[in-house]
């Protein structure tokens, strides 16, 4: 079996496996009568060598236990809830033993007053205001997460932890807090453990705490170091370790479209901290809901996003997931999804 066939099958398994976790073989699923399995496939529109960079890294990881692979899935509400993407994360990390490379980048959505994935929480002692890139009436600075939480309180405490019996053990010895590093008079301290190193990366925009042991939770204190009024902007958090494995980062915002992510001026800047080897694009359902949907504009928006990603990692592989069937206003078949699909096929050919 060629590397292409071998790993195309593995990716397809990760994409389609729904009920496998409870079974002895984590990649077997029971047949569901309403699923058209022969309509679910990965189509390579050009030379099969296009994914070889990703497949070679996967070979090294699986057979030699070396390296780190970053996968990133980008979309709207279906990714913010992190149900589909969390199943993808689990499936990828179960392709072979010891592939759990950590949880990686995430956003504490509850701070921004919106729904949060079940399996992790971040509690705060103060109120925060949330801004989403999908709401045109809102204006803020956004990073790769597409969502920002802000506070003007002089001091706040936060606690982050994982929960749930079925949640994999995501331990970490590095915590990166992405925030407005240049325009704030706030200080950040992790109070639950002693860091051996604290470094602020002004070029990318985060403060990193390194530990000589692994954690599965932490408490952080954020406070203003003078009396001048200002605000603290939180763009996301990354919890990382040095273990070889796959890190599956999910980026999603309720209602987000392609043009929503183009509002994120710090997108490429933050992406430097989590350069993806494979990007799974799932942006399109909200574009297609727009009665003024423009197929060429949609394609152009994607082109700009791809340019940002390629500026960080020119070898990043791209996988476009076409829109599901939908109803406009829950009554009328939305025929614009076919236009979005056609644009994705053209993009797949163009970017190989």
Image: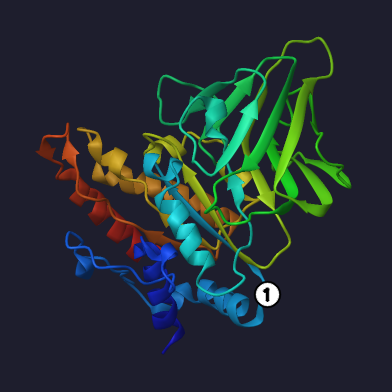
Q: Is residue 14 above or below residue 105?
A: below
Q: Position of residue 120 (x, y in %)?
A: 57, 42
Res 141 seen here: no
| Rendered-image quadrant of the N terminus | bottom left
What is the residue that sits farthest to the bottom in this orientation? 1
Q: Number of labelled discs?
A: 1
Nearer to the camera, 128 or 97 = 97
User: What colour scheme does the image use?
Assistant: rainbow
**Residue for point 44% across, 59% down:** 88
**Residue for point 66% across, 37% down:** 160
Question: Where is residue 23, by image quadrant?
Answer: bottom left
Q: Is residue 219 above or below residue 211?
A: above
| Rendered-image quadrant of the C terminus | bottom left
Q: Position of residue 189 (x, y in %)?
A: 81, 32
Whether residue 64 sits left or right of residue 142 in the image: it is right
Whether residue 336 sits left or right of residue 196 in the image: it is left
Q: Is residue 157 above or below residue 77?
A: above
């Amino acid at each position: 079996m060629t590397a292409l066939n071998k790993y195309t099958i593995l990716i397809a398994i990760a994409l389609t496996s729904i009920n496998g976790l409870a079974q002895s073989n984590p990649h077997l699923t029971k047949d569901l009568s309403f699923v058209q399995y022969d309509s679910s496939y990965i189509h390579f529109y050009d030379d099969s060598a296009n994914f070889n960079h990703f497949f070679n890294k996967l070979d090294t990881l699986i057979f030699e236990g070396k390296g780190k692979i970053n996968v990133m899935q980008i979309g709207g509400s279906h990714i913010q809830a992190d149900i589909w993407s969390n199943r993808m994360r689990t499936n990828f990390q179960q392709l072979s033993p010891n592939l759990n490379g950590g949880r990686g980048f995430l956003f504490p959505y509850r701070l921004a007053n919106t729904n949060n994935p079940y399996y992790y929480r971040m509690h705060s002692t103060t109120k925060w205001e949330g801004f989403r890139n999908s709401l045109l009436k809102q204006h803020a600075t956004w990073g790769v997460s597409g969502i920002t939480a802000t506070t003007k309180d002089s001091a706040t405490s936060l606690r982050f932890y994982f929960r749930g019996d079925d949640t994999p053990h995501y331990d970490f010895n590095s915590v990166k807090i992405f925030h407005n590093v240049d325009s704030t008079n706030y200080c950040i301290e992790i109070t639950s453990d002693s860091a051996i190193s604290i470094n602020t990366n002004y070029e990318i925009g985060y403060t990193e705490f390194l530990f000589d042991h692994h954690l599965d939770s932490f408490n952080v204190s954020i406070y203003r170091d003078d009396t001048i009024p200002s605000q603290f902007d939180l763009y996301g958090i990354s919890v990382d370790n040095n273990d070889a494995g796959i890190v599956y980062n999910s980026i999603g915002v309720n209602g987000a479209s392609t043009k929503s992510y183009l509002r994120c001026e710090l997108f490429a800047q933050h992406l430097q901290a989590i350069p993806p080897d494979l990007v799974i694009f799932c942006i399109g359902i909200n574009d297609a809901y727009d009665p003024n949907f423009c197929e060429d504009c949609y394609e152009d928006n994607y082109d700009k996003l791809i340019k940002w990603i390629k500026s960080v990692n020119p070898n990043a592989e791209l996988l476009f997931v076409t829109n599901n069937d939908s109803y406009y206003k829950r009554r009328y078949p939305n025929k614009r999804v076919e236009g979005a699909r056609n644009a994705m096929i053209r993009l797949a050919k163009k970017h190989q």
